[in-house]
Amino acid sequence: MIAQTRNDQMVGLLSGDLQRRCEPNLAWKTACSAMRMLPGLRGFWPMSSFNENGDAYDLSGQGRTLTYNGNPTYNYSSLIPYIDLDGTGDWLSRTDEAGLDILGTESYVAGAAQGLTLGGWFYFKVFPAFPTCLGKHDGVGGNQRSYVIWIDTGAGNVPVMVVSSNGTAVGQVTVLHTTGLVVDTWYFIVGRFVPSTSLTIFLDGSGVSNAAGIPASIFNSTTAFMIGARSVPPASFLNGQASLCFLCAAALSDSIISALFQQTRAIFNV
């Protein structure tokens, strides 16, 4: 059997005519299309589209505009659109509604796909105590907890996925990643819930799962969906940036989550 040697020099010479897979311009062109293809998509906020009030538009087609709170700024770096949150009172939110009350047992979703997935690209300038990426959770001491991704600063700045079966700490299940984050770096962070089966937190496509005590469904809370904060009143603020955030009423496969990371990573120089 004859194996052909890869000609790296030829690949480089042809890259002006044939786009490389991990190429920023190609990723920039396809990122929103990939996100809008996600099964069960309930909201997609790339942070590229916002109105005259600073509210972030939802490009899923379902119109779930997020309300601007505090004084964050929209900006871009190279090809990255993002919202910059200062960690002292900036967040985006949407009041509780049926489309955000994802239980993971929706009968119109095929059994094998039932669940919840949420995430996005996040950048941390500093790590205040337990900063929030996104979710629907009223914080420590509350009784309106549903689902959330935050960073556990007490465990070495690891990303965490949390769901609750009854809205309180008693019904809460958590999974921590094993890799700690550092500042001034973009990360693709995704959480997934599969009813009665698993809770998984993904960091740059690599997942860590918890299969113990997983609830059959997620509590239907009345708290708002937020990016960059949680609790009532809002607290646990994110001091950093968020981009390409999404929420799905389905448990996305490892392959889809990995593909999202691989298809968008070049924009973020990862």
Image (spheres, helix red, strand yellow):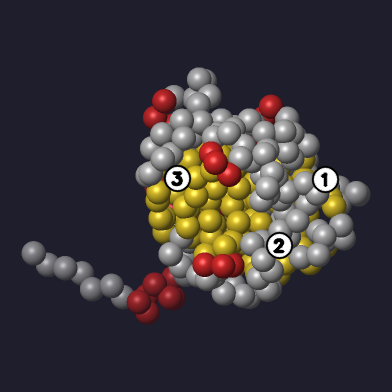
- In space, the residues marked 1 and 3 are separated at their CA atoms by 29 Å
Q: Looking at the picture, how far across and down is residue 214, in whole percent?
A: 43, 39
The residue furthest right is 52
Mark 1 belongs to which amino acid? Thr
- In space, the residues marked 3 and 2 are separated at their CA atoms by 23 Å
**Which tag is nearer the camera, tag 1 or tag 3?**
3
Viewed as shown, does residue 3 lie left or right of 122? left
- Mark 2 / mark 1, whichever is N-terminal: 1
Q: Mark 1: which secondary structure?
A: strand
Q: Which residue is mark 1?
A: 67
* Snapshot quadrant of residue 67: top right
- In space, the residues marked 2 and 1 are separated at their CA atoms by 16 Å
Local crowd size for mark 2, using a 10 Å CA cut-off: few (<14), some (14–19), many (≥20): many
* Snapshot quadrant of residue 74: bottom right
Viewed as shown, does residue 27 lie left or right of 135? left
Above/below status of 68 relative to 7: above
**Which tag is nearer the camera, tag 2 or tag 1?**
2
Query: Which label belongs to residue 199?
Result: 3
Q: Which residue is mark 2?
A: 238
Mark 3 belongs to which amino acid? Leu
Mark 2 belongs to which amino acid? Leu
